[in-house]
Amino acid sequence: MFERLSVMLMKEFLELRRDRWAMFRLIAPLLIQMLVFGYAATFTVHHVATAILDLDQSQASRSLVSHFVATSRFDVVDVAKNQADITRDIEEDKAVIAIVIHAGFARDLENGRSAPLQVIVDGTNSNTALIALGYISQIVAQFSADQASRAFSPRVGTVPPEIGISLQTRPWFNEGLDDRWFFIPGVIGTLTLLQVVSLTAFAIVREREVGTLEQIMVSPIRPFEFILGKTVPFFLIGLGDIALVSTFGILWFHVPFIGSAWVMLLGASLFLLAALGMGLLLSTFSRTQQQAFALNFFFVNPFFILSGFAFPIAAMPKLLQWFTLVNPLRYFLVVIRAVFLKGVGIAVLWPQLAALAVLALAMLTLSVLRFRKSLD
Amino acid sequence: MTAEVNDVAIRAQGLSKSFGAVQAVRAAEFTVSRGEIFGLVGPDGAGKTTIMRMLAGVLRPDAGGILVDGVDVGAEAERAKLRLSYMPQRFGLYEDLTVAENIFFYGELFSVPRKERLARSTELLDAAGMSPFRRRLAGQLSGGMKQKLGLVCALIHTPQVLLLDEPTTGVDPVSRRDFWAILYNLRESGVTILLSTAYMDEAERCSRLALLHGGQIRYCDTPARLKQAMPGALFAIASPTPRALRTAVAGQPGVLGVLLMGDRVHVRVDDPARRLPELRDLLAGLGVPDGAILATEPGIEDVFVALLGQEAPT
Ligand SMILES: Nc1ncnc2c1ncn2[C@@H]1O[C@H](COP(=O)(O)OP(=O)(O)OP(=O)(O)O)[C@@H](O)[C@H]1O
Ligand SMILES: [Mg+2]
């Protein structure tokens, strides 16, 4: 058995080595996607085009305006003279957000009444708008804190730390943390899943399609020896992927890696086994590489969306929440984020690791059984 | 009893296989003796490949039993695989591995000891005239060489029974002759060969033939006896316009079949003594001289068409 497995592995690596572009195809898409995700997939918004209309023209209102001018989150593109200017700015897309300080703002503040502030938002990009609104509440809260401290003490107080008073407008966003830190580990898991599932599925379907599977099955090789021979290389490639992309994330994006590499290795291994099982399963449902491609596309996307990568699982309908229970990515994301950012170990992560182990076992068993059937 | 079992290389009994609604093979029965070259002939979709895949143990029959070299393929596929070898219709070796690497790979899969593998591969490559191409990628070989490489890989573990599915389709005539030379040598050394072929000249070289149609074995005998079994007698008519001639002759009384063979037309008639004068009259009217009509021995293609009632796949 070992000689058949080892010659199978030898063959796989020979083929891989023969394929001049293999290394490039394995690594380049990962790094490029990592860069794209690292820069693009972020909830932080900068330079939101903002118009301001100050109808109060008091010291207090000017102070509030200066708060907006001071932060790089907002670019004040227009200091408007009247309501019509504001309307035009929004309609002509000059500004995404308009802030209107009504007359009597300072007076209301003095009297301790709540001073209304009108914020007009271009809702066509609801994401940016929501995030910007969050910042506005932060700034306003900061401002009122300043005002309050001024009211209590005549001296100008030092600026208190911003985080302490931020409003919880985005519960999924780990406040105070660079959200790139939150994304990069997720990207590592997601990209690895994509790559390993498709590589495995394609490699096996290819053998079926070009006819080499038929020829090899005439030899005394057993189906599980063939499967091992096909999957072990992708397991190693997957581990290499994770190591490479993690290193890249740590060095390039300065994501901290607080936890233990061993916990990471354990989690990654279980996760990869589950991914290999998925790829193998897909391959048993496809006769041609084209079918495998379509299936891959059909399956991997939901796994990605229903993983908690970007959309909180708790906010999903119950049915979808149940589905996430069989999604290995869901568990691995928890593991990888926790290992990277929190540095927790097996004591905390064992439920996720156990779930990954169960999923890996189930998918591999199922796919091996189906693979035997699909040989006919 | 023992003697009989030892002489039988392949025995198929009541072999059946359906794919959905398609009955690819129906109750096929045949026995191949040791040292035979047994041919499966039949039109496209007749079930040749399906039979071979079942014999090779890669496809499970719906019903029926198979004995290869005394081993029950259904019960002990793994053991049977060590004694037989199957070369699929489609080239199944790794195109991005070299000739030598493919041979090494299959040698290892069959656990052929290193020394034996080296000796055997040298011998086989020499016989196939492929020694200079050891380092060439399999994907860069010509069609004929690919088939020879397939044969070398199939023979690396010295099987007793060799199953070849249309091994020479798409191979040039010279390579086909080489290929057959290897097959004859193998038979000399006691290997039993079962092959399917679309070439009638190859069918003629087989010791016995099974004529397959619609998944059923219609006839199974030596080429000579199959020819005797052909009803009627045959005339060959040479003509510069064979197609026109075929049209003219077809449907005449007593004419059982007309077959175009290059620049001749083969006409099968029920009663030669009676039909020859009739044919002569008919042809005189078309300007064909008497001397162009000759009684002839049937080739296997004539038999094929006569027995299966349809054009042979060439
Ligand atoms: N895996 C399969 N799934 C479905 N139908 C099949 C399968 N294999 C064969 N068939 C069908 O079974 C019948 C017999 O096919 P088979 O390949 O055995 O014919 P063949 O004699 O080898 O033909 P050819 O000369 O074209 O190779 C055909 O109708 C074919 O379509
Ligand atoms: Mg066939």
Image: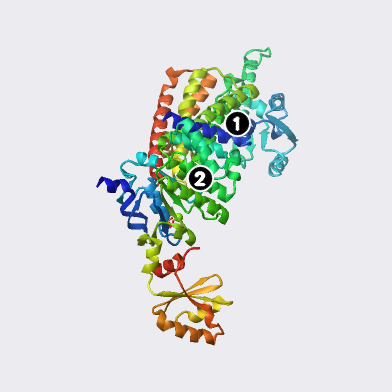
- Kindly indicate whether the residues beneath marks 2 and 1 are on one polypeptide chain: no
Instruction: Tell me the residue that label 1 is attached to.
Output: A43
Q: Position of residue B200 (x, y in %)?
A: 47, 62
Label 1 within 8 A of ligand 1 by Cβ? no
Percent coordinates x, y for residue B110 in the rendering: 43, 36
Q: At label 2, which amino acid type do we have?
A: Gly
What amino acid does circle 1 point to?
A: Phe
Residue B72, quarter of the rendered image: top left
Answer whether residue A4 is visible to the viewer in this image: yes
Q: Quadrant of ligand 1?
A: bottom left
Disc marking residue B150: 2
Which chain is disc 2 placed on?
B
Q: Crowding at label 2, few (<14), some or many (≥20) Cα neighbours within 10 Å?
A: many
Q: Position of residue B218 (x, y in %)?
A: 35, 63
Is residue A330 visible from the viewing direction of this image? Answer: no
Could you say whether the residue bearing mark 2 is in a helix, strand or loop?
helix
Could you classify mark 1 by the number of other residues whose Cα lies within 10 Å: few (under 14), some (14-19), or many (20 or more)? some
Residue nearer the viewer, B131 or A216:
B131
Quarter occupied by residue B131? top right
| Foreground residue among B34 and B52 | B34
What label does residue A293 carry, if any? none
Badge 1 element? loop
